[in-house]
């Protein structure tokens, strides 16, 4: 249920609404043939384009004209229509908006938007012909989260070096692009801009300026570099709706031991954004694909108001009226697919939410690989990585790409014998990995398990294994710790680690055959993910006679 608004919050919303209505603003959307952003006499108007102030959504008339209420602290933005592209700066950051700021606001230690000054006689938006067609590929990623310049170099060499090989039409970052040091944003933009495609951005909790006294000024630096934190754009037959569901409670509100986080936050969409979504969807044909992009999941794998969205039911109710919807989130540093139930008599029965693995994995921690980059396996046992979203009309699918491993490595097979499970604390007596790779005697086969981690699997995925030439058997999905993650986090003791293993929602388990004879046996694993894509993996088990 939507939480009750306090009297103070309600008064603030009413004040903002009345202020927004005080000044009308208008202008034209036109075809910017020469790309200079200024309308020339020979550049035609574009009718039927959506323009918004973050709440209201209007459509340009036959003369390409729109009129809206100007917010005192917000933005007017054009919603990129199919067949056109908005302007980009030298870092390939889309510039589709005009920020409105009455003043510089409080000095919070980082750059903020400059005062917007008086309204122009005509606030125009230029568009160029082109952009994604009905079939397109988008690079989607979450939580690069560099704390330092050194970790931003990891982002460059571990993520960008691989992701730049993908032929995509645009990129979308789902928040935590930074890790509190907002001075790193210009270098981040320069790096991401080298991909040569538009890079759209979602605000996360680590883009907050924790010195802000309230939510109003918490994303001023984000807005200075990336634009408004709520907006939308279209690509082919899809509309992407970007929301800010990180509600900052203000400096001094945090109980976190992290000295950088002096303020707390919670997952909340708020009435203004819900009105924006409702107004926008009312103008989008029912059969279009709707992609909601936000940072905190609507419903996550853990409990807590900073890992879930409090007023998710109100958004889900709006989305359930649509035929084709997916919600994409980050924040958790764990991969997760879940299907959120719709209210009774809704057009759709469920809303697919896909929470993405993190580019930074376990926050750039763990043993260094041969490149000098931390292994940074996630706590759910998946490697750090990114995704490619493929859209064909209104159909979509994602594919996970591990950054430090071959692209076709989508699964891992791990054996967990009784000896291994009861001897973890004895691992100090062995070299790295020796416990997991040593042979198994036949008397340890009863009770031993095989685990398969399908890195981007979910409740609709299936996993099968075959031992040698024996018939294939289906494994059972279990929400528990991946033994491979437990081993890595254990043997990396003494190396900087941010977390330990946590329950994985994409882990499958089954017993080893108890009658395997002594010898070497090949284990074949086959997985079918949420989109019907098949993946495979192979490993070995060595069986010895009892000593």
Image: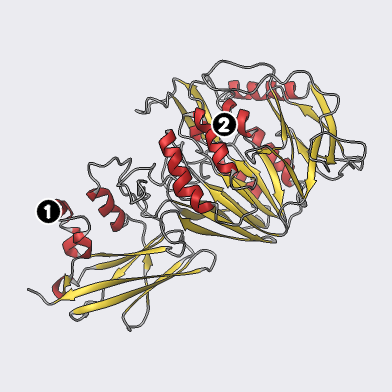
Return the x and y of residue 37 as percentages of the image width and height: 79, 35
Whether residue 84 is situated above or below residue 255 in the rendered picture:
below
The residue under the point 31% across, 45% down is 366
Whether residue 230 is situated above or below residue 375 in the rendered picture:
above
Q: Dividing the image into 4 quarters, which one contains the C terminus?
A: bottom left
Q: Which residue is at the front of the view, 155 or 202?
A: 155
Q: Dividing the image into 4 quarters, which one contains the N terminus?
A: top right
Q: Is 15 on the left or on the right of 531, as rendered?
A: right
Asked whether residue 514 appears in the rendered view, the answer is: yes
Return the x and y of residue 117 as percentages of the image width and height: 74, 18
Q: How is the image coloured?
A: secondary structure
Query: Label 1: how many residues lie within 10 Å, few (<14), some (14-19) or many (20+)?
Result: few
Q: Is 185 on the left or on the right of 27, as rendered?
A: left
Return the x and y of residue 151 as percentages of the image width and height: 42, 38
- The numbered mark, 1 or 2, whose residue comes first in the sequence reads 2
Element type at mark 2: loop
The quadrant in which residue 7 appears is top right
Q: Which residue is mark 1?
A: 429
Asked whether residue 358 appears in the rendered view, the answer is: no
Q: Which residue is at the front of the view, 10 or 59?
A: 59
Query: Label 2: how many residues lie within 10 Å, few (<14), some (14-19) or many (20+)?
Result: few
Task: Return the residue found at the far left.
Answer: 547
Q: CA distance from mark 1 to mark 2?
A: 57 Å
Q: Which residue is mark 2?
A: 4
The residue under the point 52% across, 68% down is 533
Return the x and y of residue 185 as percentages of the image width and height: 54, 32
The residue under the point 51% across, 48% down is 160
Q: Are marks 1 and 2 in contact (CB under 8 Å)?
A: no
Q: Is 265 on the left or on the right of 524, as rendered?
A: right
Number of labelled discs? 2
Q: In the image, which is nearer the foreground, mark 1 or mark 2? A: 1
């Amino acid at each position: 249920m939507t939480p009750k608004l306090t009297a103070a919050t309600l008064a603030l919303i009413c004040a903002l609404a009345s202020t927004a209505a005080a000044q009308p603003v208008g202008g034209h959307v036109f075809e910017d043939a020469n790309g200079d952003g200024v309308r020339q006499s020979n550049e035609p108007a574009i009718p039927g384009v959506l323009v918004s102030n973050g709440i209201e959504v209007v459509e340009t008339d036959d003369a390409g004209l729109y009129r809206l209420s100007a917010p005192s602290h917000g933005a007017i933005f054009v919603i990129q229509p199919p067949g056109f592209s908005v302007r980009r700066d030298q870092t390939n950051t889309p510039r589709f908006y005009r920020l409105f700021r009455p003043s510089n606001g409080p000095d919070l230690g980082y750059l903020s938007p400059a005062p917007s000054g008086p309204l122009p006689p005509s606030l125009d938006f230029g568009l160029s012909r082109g952009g994604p067609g009905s079939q397109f590929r988008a690079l989607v990623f979450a939580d690069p989260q560099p704390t330092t310049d050194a970790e931003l170099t990891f982002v460059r060499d571990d993520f960008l070096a691989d992701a730049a090989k993908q032929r995509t039409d645009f990129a979308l970052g789902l928040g935590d692009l930074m890790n509190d040091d907002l001075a790193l944003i210009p270098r981040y933009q320069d790096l991401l801009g080298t991909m040569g495609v538009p890079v759209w951005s979602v605000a996360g909790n680590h883009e907050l300026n924790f010195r802000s006294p309230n939510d109003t000024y918490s994303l001023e630096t984000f807005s200075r570099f990336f634009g408004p934190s709520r907006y939308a754009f279209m690509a082919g037959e899809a509309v992407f709706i970007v929301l800010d569901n990180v509600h900052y409670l203000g400096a001094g509100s945090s109980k976190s031991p992290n000295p950088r986080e002096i303020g707390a936050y919670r997952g909340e969409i708020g009435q203004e954004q819900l009105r924006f979504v409702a107004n926008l969807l009312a103008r989008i044909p029912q059969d279009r694909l709707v992609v909601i992009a936000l940072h905190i999941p609507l419903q996550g794998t853990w409990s807590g108001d900073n890992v879930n969205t409090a007023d998710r039911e109100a958004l889900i109710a709006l989305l359930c009226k649509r035929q084709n919807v997916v919600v994409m989130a980050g924040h958790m540093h764990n991969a997760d697919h879940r299907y959120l139930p719709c209210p009774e008599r809704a057009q759709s029965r469920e809303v697919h939410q896909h929470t993405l693995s993190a580019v930074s994995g376990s926050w750039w921690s763990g043993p260094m690989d041969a490149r000098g980059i931390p292994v940074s396996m996630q706590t759910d046992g998946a490697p750090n990585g990114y995704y490619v979203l493929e859209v064909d009309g209104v159909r979509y699918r994602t594919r996970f790409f591990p950054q430090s491993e071959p692209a076709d490595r989508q699964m891992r097979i791990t054996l967990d014998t009784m000896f291994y499970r009861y001897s973890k604390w004895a691992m100090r007596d062995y070299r790295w990995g020796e416990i997991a790779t040593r042979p198994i005697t036949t008397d340890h086969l009863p009770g031993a398990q095989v685990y398969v981690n399908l890195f981007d699997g979910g409740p609709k995925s299936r996993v099968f294994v075959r031992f040698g030439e024996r018939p294939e058997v289906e494994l059972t999905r279990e929400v528990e710790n991946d033994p491979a993650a437990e081993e890595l986090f254990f043997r990396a003791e003494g190396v900087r680690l941010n977390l330990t293993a946590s329950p994985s929602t994409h882990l499958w388990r089954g017993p080893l055959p108890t009658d395997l004879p002594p010898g070497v046996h090949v284990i074949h694993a086959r997985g079918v993910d949420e989109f019907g894509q098949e993946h495979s993996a192979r490993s070995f088990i060595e069986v010895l006679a009892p000593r």
